[in-house]
Amino acid sequence: MRGSAKGAWHNEDVKNAIDGFLRDLAAVRACSPATIRGYRNDLDGFLGFVATRLENRPVDSIRPADIDALSVRSFLADRRGRGLSAKSNARALSAIRSIFRWLVQTGQAAVNPASALRTPKTERRLPRVLSIAEVGQLLDLPGGDDAISRRDRAILELLYATGLRVSELVALDLDDIQTREKLVRVLHGKGGKQRIVPFGDPAAQALAGWRAVRTELFGKRSGRLPESDRTALFLSSRGGRIGDRQIRRILNQAVRSAALARGVHPHTLRHSFATHLLSCGADLRAIQELLGHSSLSTTQKYTHLDAARLIDVYRKSHPKA
């Protein structure tokens, strides 16, 4: 089959190939919608650049054979000239490398023009982490007893108690919470796997407070909602499943009320969750499981965060520092 496809190298245009590649990412590799959008933006940008470089040819006339290593280098150089970061260029190169690897494997291209190019070096920045005291400020804010306040309190408590990604939090259904055992069943944002994450008393109490008023406030509207929204753990003020933008607004409001420095986002609570576990003696493998990381190397960045914290404590505390 692959042999017969090789004769079609010049027949399949790259525009259609991008569509096929992204369908494969979604169906076979179970990549998240955000990952698919990122690949789409980078690959469409690359194809547009190549079409312009080739005397303004239509994008649907570009074939894999029209693209060589110089095309990729020129694209990356153009992005650098427009001030795009090394991290952004590394991501774009990864997307180009991935689609051509797929094209070669499926017999639609002879070579991968990006295979020999070096990935741009990126500055390794450690993610921001709140101290335990700052998290306490954020979660101990006095709040009202209305349904929205109870919901917001439960969201913030659960984010820090479990280290969930925002996408995982908004996807939670009522039956994902095991109240008696204080466990939450999470569908991974990456890969579609499941994991079980425990949470403590403060989150359990906040969840109980929210669930006590959830039906009372939104029950009358639930009949007009799709089934996926009716079963959602967290609802918007309109009665549908809450979205990630609303979660960010809730956190931003809490940050302002707690008078914390700006730049705190939901992933900051995830980083703080992992770093606090590590600094209190948790095993790195256990943290990997709780976070849902497929690779331990992803989790190991928190060892750098903990080392940075220790250095900061030393410099502030030691008389000869």
Image: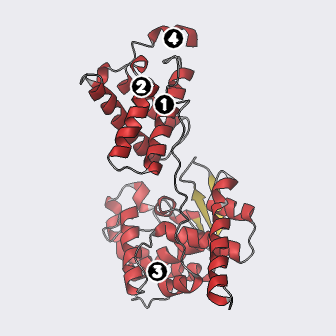
Residue contact between numbered discs 2 and 3, judged by CB atoms under 8 Å: no
Q: Quadrant of residue 29?
A: top right
Q: Is residue 162 above or below residue 136?
A: above
Alpha carbon distance from label 2 to label 4: 14 Å
In front: label 4 or label 3: 4
Disc on res. 99: 1
Mark 4 lies on residue? 6
Is tag 4's residue or tag 3's residue first in the polypeptide sequence?
4
Q: Amino acid at mark 1?
A: Ile
Left or right, 92 with respect to 121, comes to left
Mark 2 lies on residue? 17
Left or right, 205 with respect to 197, comes to left
Alpha carbon distance from label 2 to label 1: 8 Å
Is tag 1's residue or tag 3's residue first in the polypeptide sequence?
1
The image quadrant where one finds the C terminus is: bottom right
Residue contact between numbered discs 2 and 4, judged by CB atoms under 8 Å: no
Element type where label 4 sits in the image: helix
* Disc 1 crowd, CA 10 A, few/some/many (<14, 14-19, 20+): many
- Tell which of 277 and 182 is nearer to you: 277
Residue contact between numbered discs 2 and 1, judged by CB atoms under 8 Å: yes
Q: Residue at x 33, y 28 (%)?
A: 50
Mark 3 lies on residue? 153
Q: Is residue 313 above or below residue 303?
A: below
